[in-house]
Image (tube, rainbow, N blue to C red):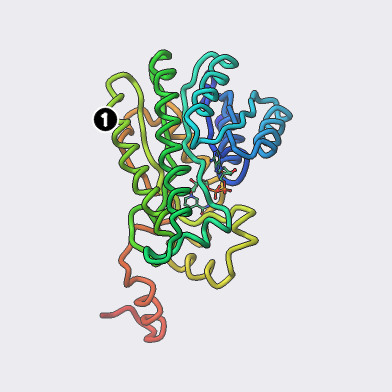
Amino acid sequence: MTHPTRLQGKVAVVTGGGHGLGAETARVLAAQGARVAVVDLAYEGAVQVASEIEAAGGQALAVQADVRSESDVQAMATTVTDRFGRIDVLHNNAAALGVAQRQADRDVCNVSLEAWDTALDVNARGAMLCCKHVVPVMLRGGGGSIVFSTSGFGQLGDITLTAYAASKAALMALARSVAAQYGKQGIRSNAIMIGFVLNDHAQKTVPQEVKQILLAQHLTPDLGRPRQIADAVAFLASDESSFITGAVIPVDGGFTSHSPSMVPLREYFERQGSNKL
Ligand SMILES: NC(=O)c1ccc[n+]([C@@H]2O[C@H](COP(=O)([O-])OP(=O)(O)OC[C@H]3O[C@@H](n4cnc5c(N)ncnc54)[C@H](O)[C@@H]3O)[C@@H](O)[C@H]2O)c1
């Protein structure tokens, strides 16, 4: 379903908008009428996405910023406000997810300190800095909506990605803090807990066997698509979600909704030819 005017008049900032889920979200927000700042450390990606939006008739601005850097984030908020006059939507999506980072982020005895610091700095500190410098702009404009991208790793224990998990748990707390602190002044703040989504990068790098293990734990026929995440962000960015704040909303094909014994039980029942217990 398309909503060509749902976000008309709004200005959105998407961090990590130059690639993956953030890029799709930037495109969808723009297609629904928002003027979009595509913010990324990787400037080429941001420029590419902003050009695609402009070519499709939307309005976009590419901004290079390292969300770890307070001066970069402050300059980003000023640049966007100078260009578009306001900020109504902040999507805290940027995350350190390169192959080297993921491979150094293992169980707690084997996670490198560098990987720990990078995950916390980009994923958690970066989102905090964006709130710190965008919330005052939103308050001047009468309110806004902030959406954090988090993960099942932030909610449930697993055997690897210790630093990533801690950073994503921090975002759930941050989303609720911001909701509590600025709700009365018109700012809503929510987190989406994302399931496994095959962006082009994951398509190439994640082994087929791992994809199958993860698919078995989703209740949907398929793993997620970037558009499904973008649609959830667009809804939370819009006034249609005006009574939703302080929430952590699973957008995960049911990945975090079911009993841990479900998959082995399903296999057991298949072998038995019945689900009678
Ligand atoms: N893809 C999934 O299955 C999945 C699952 C759960 C949660 N998520 C979350 O969704 C978000 C997007 O994930 P993705 O798969 O699209 O990742 P991705 O790696 O494709 O995109 C991340 C973007 O963030 C940018 N970035 C990295 N460090 C930055 C920095 N310091 N400053 C500014 N930008 C920076 C990268 O350049 C990149 O464009 C992340 O927060 C991720 O944790 C994704």
Identity, as a three-letter code, of the amino acid under mark 1? Ala
* Above or below for 219 versus 250: below
Q: Position of residue 58 (x, y in %)?
A: 66, 25
Q: Specify the farthest residue to the right.
A: 55
Direction from residue 69 to residue 259 in the image, left or right? left
Direction from residue 223 to residue 43 in the image, left or right? right
Q: Residue at x 32, y 68 (%)?
A: 260
Instruction: Name the quarter where the C terminus is drawn.
Output: bottom left
Q: 89 or 157: which is nearer to us?
A: 157
* Above or below for 227 versus 180: below
- In this figure, what is the number of numbered marks? 1
Identify the residue under disc 1.
Answer: 180
Direction from residue 9 to residue 44 in the image, left or right? right
Callout 1: helix, strand or loop? helix
Near mark 1 (Cα within 10 A), the count class, few <14, some 14-19 or many ≥20, is some
Q: Position of residue 207 (x, y in %)?
A: 58, 69
Q: 92 or 114: which is nearer to us?
A: 114
* Above or below for 44 versus 263: above
Q: Residue at x 53, y 33 (%)?
A: 14
Q: Position of residue 51 (x, y in %)?
A: 71, 31
* Above or below for 64 versus 259: above
Q: In the image, is the residue at mark 1 within 8 Å of ligand 1 by its beta carbon?
A: no
Q: 267 or 106: which is nearer to us?
A: 106
Instruction: Name the quarter where the N terminus is drawn.
Output: top right
Q: Residue at x 39, y 54 (%)?
A: 165
Q: Residue at x 62, y 55 (%)?
A: 201
Q: 222 or 178: which is nearer to us?
A: 178
Q: Position of residue 18 (x, y in %)?
A: 62, 39
Direction from residue 250 to residue 199 in the image, left or right? right
Q: Specify the farthest residue to the front.
A: 113
